[in-house]
Amino acid sequence: MRFFSFLILVFLVTLNVNAQHANVSLGKNYSSNFNNLIYNDNSNHHTSFKPILKSDLNFDTDSVLQEKNISDYSNWYLRKLFSEHFIILEGEDYKVLASPVINLSKGKEVNEGKNTFANTRGFVIEGDLGKKISFFSSFVENQSIFPNYVDNFIKENTVVPGQGYAREFKQTGFDYAMSSGYVSYRANKMFAVQFGHGKHFIGDGYRSLLLSDNTFNYPYLRIQTTFWKAQYTSLYTEFQDINYFSNNGLANYDQMGYAKKYLSAHYLSVNITKKLNISLFESVIWRMNHAPGSNGFDVNYLNPITMLRPIEFSVNSPDNVLVGVNGKYKLPLSSYLYGQLILDEFSLNDLQERDGFWANKFGYQLGFKMFNALKVENLTFQTEYNYVRPYTYAHHNPQQNYAHYNQPLAHPLGANFSEFLIITNYRWKRWEVDGKINFAKYGDNIKNDPKSYGHDLYMSTGNYAEEEGLTGMGSGRPSDFGIEMYQGNLTTVNLKNFNIAYVVNPKTNLKINLGLTLRDLKSEEAEMQTQFINFGIQSDLFNHYYDF
């Protein structure tokens, strides 16, 4: 009792902390302005749980943008266009910033002769109230026509990748919208709480096998505790399965909205030395209390400091538990190695027997990133390899899979895949050049075959549909043993992307952009080639993953 009283006392005591408790934007291109400082050899930042709170950094991100990119303009209109937020309200105890968000672009898919476009309008608002509270809100409304491979994905999944439910627009396009926001409260240097609607990313690479911002926004509560060389984060979220009722003959089910499920996750990051960080991850996807006659939350999973796997065993739960490890080691020349390991279900004995047991569900990531590569200032080089076994993240009951809003919560390819990435970025003044090469290989579903081959997380890993008298979940796996990588419809994707841009306003990452995408997909059932060129002006604040 004394221990908990001490924690409450520490939480309530106000220390002299920075007023900016807003998030550093998840946008990879936006944060490339100061990633070198975040991963600097002399820093002791906890970098892998994102978004990072600005008050956790030992530098001011706005000052870095000002120093690197922004000139002083005496003309008000030039300042607003090239160097400032559109609205700035500032007083003794508050500061509010607001700007429009746009994406006005035209493109052409050369092979198909298809014209594409994007028309995005919205806003971002960010502010600080006193020394303890920060807030953020954004909204975007969109109409777009996409290149064919993205168009096919949207029609199949009814969502625009990571950006919301897709409604038909003029027969060939889609209308969709997304809002996000949060309120952060920081009592002192140790404790921070954030409640909002948004996304998270765990890792130090381009992809994450633990939790990524690949899917749509979701409501969440994040509790962060920083002490000694450690940072401990508890995350509670609500996810949705938007097709669950209609896919299973329950279209007239007497329930408002979509089927809900929940995630409880714990993440412990420890800077073991100035160079080495090891982080432990555990999460559970759960629906409700499984006790007879109970329809409420399983409160056992709300404990922020207990281990989830023992709880799952103790309550005889069928829930979906994942555990993982994230690691980072700093190297000379402003570079670092990083990696991840994710374990779903796992049998060491079967793995040693090499019998291809279906429940050996795991994945790993290995990567390397270098800032100021080849001693060229602002040149970044990154290479990464991802590998995930069949059926990882999936579940006997697909409503408890590791997915949300028809997309995986980790890698866009789900499971049963491998991927190799090479990424470069170069900045000179307000000019930037980006290049990316992506080689992926996966085993997809086989046409007219109801079995799951381990790629689609929304298919049951067993015979759940037959047991429950439902449809649309598949009818199990081909076997218990002899499960191989890339089983099913063998598919390869070779994608190359090149962009050159001029940053108009670094504060909102507003840029004029010219991009080229070359994509070649080959499978045992089909082939598709894409040559896509686009040009436009956009506020590049959010990650949009079209590289699949």
Image (tube, grey):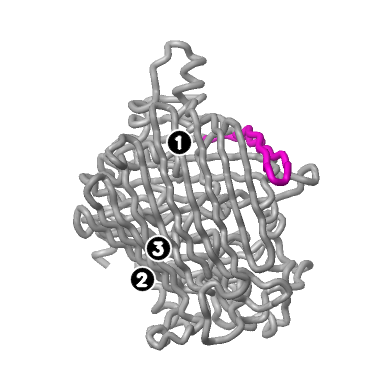
Q: Is residue 168 left or right of residue 52?
A: right
Look at discs 1 and 3 and give the one toward the viewer. Answer: 1
Visible residue check, residue 477: yes
Q: Is residue 61 magenta?
A: no
Give the mark nearer the N terminus: 1 vs 3. Answer: 3
Kind of residue indicated by mark 3 = Gln
The amino acid sitting under disc 2 is Thr
Tell me if residue 339 comes above or below residue 307 in the rendering: above
Magenta residues? 103-124
Question: Circle 3 is placed at which residue position?
Answer: 365
Q: Position of residue 174 (x, y in %)?
A: 72, 46
Report the residue marked by disc 2.
306
Residue at point 36%, 71% (across, down): 306
Q: Nearer the viewer, residue 78 or 486?
A: 486
Please name which of the two marks, 1 or 2, marks the residue nearer to the observer.
1
Q: Of helix, strand and loop, which mostly describes the magenta segment?
A: strand
Magenta residue check for 109 = yes
Question: For the residues marked 3 and 2, what is the alpha-carbon distance in whole angstroms?
Answer: 27 Å
Residue bearing the label numbered 1:
433
At 56% from the left and 38% from the top, the residue drawn is 515
